[in-house]
Image (spheres, coloured by chain):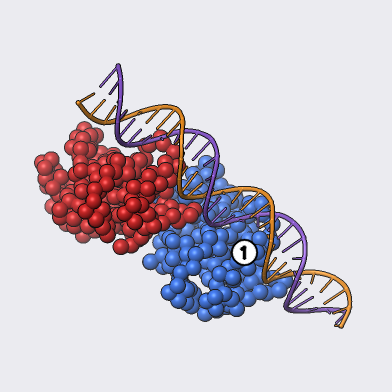
Chain colours: A blue, B red, C purple, D orange
DNA sequence: AGGAATTTTTATAAATTTATTATATAGCAA
DNA sequence: TTGCTATATAATAAATTTATAAAAATTCCT
């Protein structure tokens, strides 16, 4: 799971990131422009978005990414006074808000709730695709009852593919999501790992489900 | 067994902790925020929770941890008069309550009752896993009739593993539970003791039941 | 206090994962 | 088909994580 946290108060940003890092992968932005750029990669499972940020405010960020067709759940952070009503108004789209200051535990709880609601996290913590079942906590996979061991990176790769089955993912998107923006690895690693993953799934007959879109990236067939 | 006691009256908190410490490991919190943070680690067998505490009251604490899916039994402490509170407490997923002031013996008895009900403690005060039997009082283990001596830390480690058989425990969770939050030991100690424990159980054939989940932690196989 | 047992630290070995690199193969355009 | 480019594959190197052993420090007993 990968989050994006947007907050212009740097100490606060830092502490939120710290707090969430033991459970999730976390990207951060301190202004609306960076936030938009990162959000547009479409690699996050939840965005935590301060309303009052420089350059482009939180509402505008949300609106822009929604116009772009992204359905990632957004959790707004808002000061108690002024904007609360407006935020409430936005609540319709499966999003949520949290009034500052807030408790660490509540932030985590609400993020998890959004993940559950959006289907990224089923109640029993598993993700499914045809006969494949990702056992969230155990990092391995059941394929038609049989267990296959995946490494951490292989697991995240498969998770990302399943979450986006039926849509093409560019190699850059995959790289950003699984290896992170700040990774200093080359993007060729995506091909290598795609190969590893295919090889592990091949005996179970899933090899052909991962399609190569030449010049673009990869796609997992719709179920 | 590890308890969390939440009470803002410090002398009372102190005396409760004192009282319980000869039988259990005890963590303490004096306000709702600390309570939530500690509870979220999910390492306690019972939480003793005063209703009237600063910042976030007991009900809110309970609600938050229940929303998060934690099933740890909660024993509410509540003032004598507020009948309404009792009902509310039990409605919101509390498991038992105790009216202040109370007798030491009664508190202990109710905690033990909760432990039994939740399955942490069988009626005869032992914990079992396949052929292994943890004799609560004495710090050693019967494996298929034969006795093996464990040290205190080894015992708590095995106890924690058995209580969570079938689910992965991160090294951090294990560390927090067995060594405590305030410990100034390094987390590598977990690996070392896991090794000690495996070595002691190996002759009895349990070595392979403790699985290493690389990059995450450890897991004891389901029975 | 002295000695034994336990816990912790530290160093090294072993296992496994991740990253690099080189080469083979496949798809596509002219 | 030929030649070019992108991807697949394989082999190897590097980095990371865990297991193990053993020494050092601490605690626990009489």
Q: Chain of mark 1?
A: A
Quick check: B33 left or right of B88?
Answer: right
Position in image of residue B95 (x %, y %) = 20, 56
Instruction: Name which residue lies at 18% across and 55% down.
Output: B122
Q: Is residue B4 visible?
A: no
Classify A107 as above or below B52.
below
User: Which type of secondary structure does the marked residue at label 1 adopt?
Assistant: helix
**B194 or A62: which is nearer to us?**
B194
Q: Quadrant of residue B21?
A: top left
Instruction: Name which residue lies at 42% across and 48% down.
Output: B171
Residue linked to disc 1: A193
Position in image of residue B117 (x %, y %) = 19, 57
Instruction: Name which residue lies at 62% across and 59% down.
Output: A176
Position in image of residue A160 (x %, y %) = 55, 66
Total count of labels: 1
Q: Quadrant of residue A203?
A: bottom right
Q: Is residue A192 visible?
A: yes
Instruction: Name which residue lies at 41% across and 56% down.
Output: B211
**B159 or B184: which is nearer to us?**
B159
**B196 or A185: which is nearer to us?**
B196
Classify D24 as above or below B111.
above
**Circle 1 Cα neighbour tier, 10 Å, few/some/many (<14 / 14–19 / ≥20):** some
């Amino acid at each position: 799971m990968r989050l994006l946290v947007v907050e212009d108060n740097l100490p606060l940003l830092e502490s939120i990131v710290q707090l969430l890092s033991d459970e999730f992968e976390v990207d951060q932005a301190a202004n609306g422009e960076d936030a938009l750029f990162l959000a547009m990669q479409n690699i996050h499972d939840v965005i935590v978005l301060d309303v009052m940020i420089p350059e482009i405010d939180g509402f505008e960020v949300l609106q822009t990414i929604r116009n772009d067709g992204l359905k990632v759940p957004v959790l707004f952070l808002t000061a108690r006074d002024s904007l609360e009503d407006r935020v409430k108004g936005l609540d319709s789209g499966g999003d949520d808000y949290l009034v500052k200051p807030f408790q660490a535990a509540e932030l985590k709880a609400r993020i998890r709730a959004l993940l559950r609601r959006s289907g990224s996290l089923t109640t029993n913590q598993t993700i499914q695709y045809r006969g494949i079942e990702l056992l969230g906590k155990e990092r391995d996979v059941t394929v038609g009852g049989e267990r296959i061991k995946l490494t951490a990176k292989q697991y995240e790769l498969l998770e990302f593919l399943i979450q986006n089955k039926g849509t093409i993912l560019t190699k850059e998107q995959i790289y950003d999501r699984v290896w992170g923006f700040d990774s200093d690895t080359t993007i060729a690693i995506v091909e290598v790992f795609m190969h590893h993953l295919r090889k592990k799934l091949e005996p179970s007959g899933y090899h052909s489900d991962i399609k190569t879109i030449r010049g673009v990236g990869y796609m997992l067939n719709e179920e």
